[in-house]
């Protein structure tokens, strides 16, 4: 757990003084369980919520309650804990005012999942793997593409697409929320493998089954529903890759599939 509170002037370390800072700011006799607000912040919305109380004031519980629209910060914590196993990004009426949501089949999801540009979530992580000469396949808009990569999309006025990449080998191939749209995803991955140099990185970011609207029978733009086990089996069966890294579901109801060509 990291400290997201402003460090008092003259103190350079939050991790070493974490408990002392929390107690000074929030744990006061009349401030019932305000430390739970911080736990709710970390568990419920990945640190987006901050405490707006000034140091020394014991009223941050009232501040949090106003933001959450509820009278008890503990209630939000309980709701978060109850939902955290069933949904990687629990969204409920307790804190729906904090960010826009959309509903599908009676379930609630962050509205940004309906707006495209899933790559904004995977790019920071991809920067640890992808460098050199590379392509971003299926980026939709050039401004959404991986920094430094050659953007590839059938919408662009050139001859390139997922099955026809520029000449030469690449140090990495990056693709976010694209493979599920391709009729022949196996053929695409087979072809991409031939375009990677030795030790080249194939970096995929894909929709997870937990987002119901992204399933092909609900979203007809998606032809496939690819899951972590499928990508792992593909990479291992080919015998062309090492350093295979397959993640679970992240906060964007998506997962990573990364492999390095031998």
Image: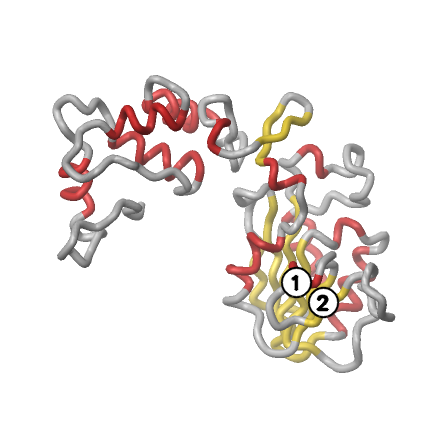
Residue that appears at 60% across and 61% down: 258
In the picture, residue 193 is in which quadrant? Answer: bottom right
The 10 Å Cα crowd at callout 2, few under 14, some 14 to 19, many 20 or more, is many
The reply to whether dot 2 and dot 1 touch (C-beta < 8 Å) is: yes
Q: Position of residue 57 (x, y in %)?
A: 17, 32
Task: Tell me how far mark 2 sits from mark 1, CA to CA.
Answer: 6 Å
Residue wearing tag 2: 151
- Check the picture and name the quadrant holding the N terminus: top left
Q: Which mark is residue 102?
A: none
Q: Position of residue 173 (x, y in %)?
A: 67, 68
Please, is residue 232 above or below residue 169 in the view?
A: above
Q: Position of residue 242 (x, y in %)?
A: 60, 68
Please, is residue 173 above or below residue 104 in the view?
A: below
Left or right position of 121 against 207: left
Q: Earlier in the sequence, mark 2 or mark 1?
A: 1
Element under disc 2: strand
Front position in the image: 14 or 237: 14
Q: Position of residue 148 (x, y in %)?
A: 61, 72
Residue that appears at 32% across and 35% down: 39
Label tally: 2
Residue that appears at 57% across and 74% down: 131
Left or right position of 71 against 221: left
Front position in the image: 108 or 243: 108
Q: Which mark is residue 145?
A: 1
Please, is residue 119 above or below residue 41 in the view?
A: below
Left or right position of 23 against 202: left
Please, is residue 88 above or below residue 258 in the view?
A: above
The 10 Å Cα crowd at callout 1, few under 14, some 14 to 19, many 20 or more, is many
Residue that appears at 66% across and 73% down: 134
């Amino acid at each position: 757990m990291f400290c997201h509170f402003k460090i008092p002037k003259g103190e350079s370390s939050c991790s070493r003084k974490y408990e002392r800072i929390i107690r000074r700011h929030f744990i006061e006799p009349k401030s019932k369980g305000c430390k739970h607000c911080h736990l709710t912040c970390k568990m419920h919305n990945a640190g987006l919520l901050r405490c707006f109380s000034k140091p020394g004031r014991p009223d941050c519980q009232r501040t949090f309650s106003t933001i959450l629209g509820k009278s008890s910060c503990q209630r939000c914590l309980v709701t978060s804990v109850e939902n955290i196993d069933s949904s990687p990004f629990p969204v409920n009426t307790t804190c729906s005012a904090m960010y826009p949501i959309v509903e599908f089949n009676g379930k609630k999801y962050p509205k940004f999942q309906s707006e495209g540009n899933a790559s904004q979530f995977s790019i920071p992580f991809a920067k640890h793997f992808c460098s050199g000469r590379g392509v971003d396949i299926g980026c939709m808009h050039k401004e959404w593409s991986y920094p430094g990569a050659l953007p590839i999309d059938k919408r662009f006025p050139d001859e390139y697409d997922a099955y026809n990449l520029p000449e030469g080998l690449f140090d990495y191939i990056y693709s976010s929320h694209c493979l599920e749209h391709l009729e022949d995803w196996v053929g695409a991955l087979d072809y991409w493998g031939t375009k990677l140099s030795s030790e080249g990185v194939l970096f995929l970011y894909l929709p997870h089954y937990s987002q119901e609207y992204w399933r092909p029978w609900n979203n007809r733009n998606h032809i496939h529903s690819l899951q972590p086990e499928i990508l792992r089996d593909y990479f291992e069966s080919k015998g062309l890759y090492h350093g295979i890294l397959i993640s679970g579901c992240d906060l964007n109801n998506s997962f990573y599939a990364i492999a390095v060509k031998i």
